[in-house]
Amino acid sequence: MAISDLTSPAAVFDRCRVRRNRERSQQNFKEHSFLFDWAAQEMKDRLAFINRSFSSVLQIGGHTMRALEDNEQMVGFTAVMDCASFSPKDKRLFVQAEEDFFPFGAGTLDLVLGAMTLHTVNDLPGALIQIRRSLKPDGLFLAAFFGGETLYELRDVLIESEAQIRGGISPRVFPFADKQQAGALLQRAGFALPVVDSEIITVTYPNLFRLMRELRGMGEGNALRLRDKSFPGKTFFRKAEDLYRQRYSDPDGRIRASFEILFMIGWAPHESQQKPLRPGSAETSLAEALDTMEIKTGDRTKP
């Protein structure tokens, strides 16, 4: 299995740690999988609006392989890919590989589902380009992953707590892409008809420690390459807990944690797809549509 270059300055994530986090979470994942299950159902609902079937399907993300099964639109070959090791209980092919070292050839798939893994890919632009190339003409890419508003409360209190106690900060919460960035990445990768939308889910916890336990149970523990590997100490966590309760707690004392799920849809280009009109090719002017007078720039009266 190829592992992203951990020595590269552009490598934000320690992919070996990402893999270990996911593998360690497998045993009790169902106790913490509610966001992944919800995202998988949303993906199935979006797919249901598309009136076609798919004969060669790849699902990226082993955690959600069962949540996305039993879909009548997937009528043929289905494979599951993840950087971590998973064991499908059915006869589907499992491929252990990195998203940015995509192992599928050009024009081999007609549906790729990205199920809650893309937020920890080091070279996301490169991964999306490779995914688009793997699709047959008019093939579909549909993905869900954590977006920019995810855990903003936790990031805020950890940064301030560490700055006050240590006089500096170290990365502890992932840098997540926002909707605008996600849309730009789809366009850069060459997808046609790109669409990005998002949903924010707010979850409450009795304390900071339960939130961090949930993140580990999801397989989403700190996997940043430049993370501080030393234990920050009880004083740090007490300060963070106090700040969290001051800023982001409900009247009942429970603290809030936001999770933004981004959804991406894009198509491999095909001549049958709807295309924007060429500039100047419209048969009706905007002035006629608005029932106003058109003044051409060359007809302006000079002062």
Image (cartoon, rainbow, N blue to C red):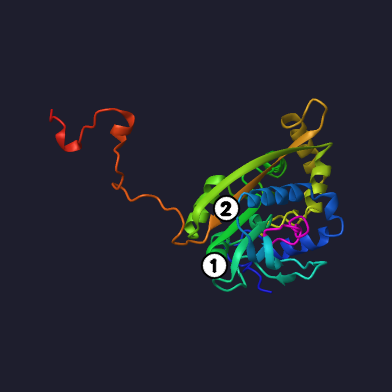
Q: Amino acid at mark 2?
A: Ile
Question: Which contiguous range is marked in magenta?
Answer: 60-73
Residue 199 point in image, percent of width and height: 65, 41
**Spatial separation of the CA atoms under disc 2 and disc 1:** 15 Å
Q: Which of the 4 image quarters holds residue 102?
A: bottom right
Q: How many marks?
A: 2
Q: Which mark is residue 204?
A: none
Residue 251 point in image, percent of width and height: 79, 25
Looking at the image, which residue is at 59% across and 49% down? Answer: 177
Q: Amino acid at mark 1?
A: Lys
Q: Which residue is mark 2?
A: 265
Left/right placement of residue 209 relative to residue 7 reads right
Q: Which of the 4 image quarters holds residue 259?
A: top right
Quick one: quadrant of the C terminus? top left
Residue 269 point in image, percent of width and height: 48, 61
Element class at badge 1: strand
Left/right placement of residue 267 relative to residue 115 reads left
Q: In the rendered view, would you say 63 is above or below 76?
A: above
